[in-house]
Amino acid sequence: MISNNASYFKHLEQENIKCVDTGEFMSCEKTYACVHVSRSTIYRLVKDGLFPEPIRENGRTIGWRSMDVFGWLNQEWKRRNGII
């Protein structure tokens, strides 16, 4: 189990670290794919206060700041592994 978690975390780090460094805006689709949950699950988590609120970019596009998403992923990984 630990190897699966470690490999998953390493995958996130390798694939997405550039987004975090640049503070990139992530579209809804990219966020769903990154977090590996459905749209309805994301919005349920937002409603329950367990996931960052989406933001509007340029007044139209809805998405998330990559720093917020990866911060949440990091906290979730720690929570699931009993670190926090």
Image: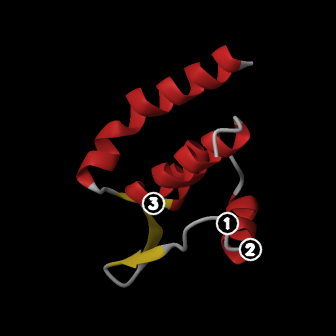
Which is more N-terminal, label 2 or label 3? 2
Looking at this view, is 81 or 9 the one in front?
A: 81
Residue 47: where, in percent of width, then height? 71, 76
Cα separation between marks 1 and 2 = 6 Å
Q: Which residue is mark 1?
A: 50
Q: Which mark is residue 48?
A: 2
Q: Which mark is residue 68?
A: 3
The residue carrying pointer 3 sits among few (fewer than 14), some (14 to 19) or many (20 or more) residues within 10 Å by Cα, namely some
Against 38, residue 46 (above or below) is below
The residue carrying pointer 2 sits among few (fewer than 14), some (14 to 19) or many (20 or more) residues within 10 Å by Cα, namely few
Residue 48: where, in percent of width, then height? 74, 74
Q: Is residue 63 visible?
A: yes
Looking at this view, is 34 or 58 the one in front?
A: 34
The residue at the point 58 percent across, 49 percent down is 75
Q: Assign a secondary structure to mark 2.
A: loop
Cα separation between marks 1 and 3 = 12 Å
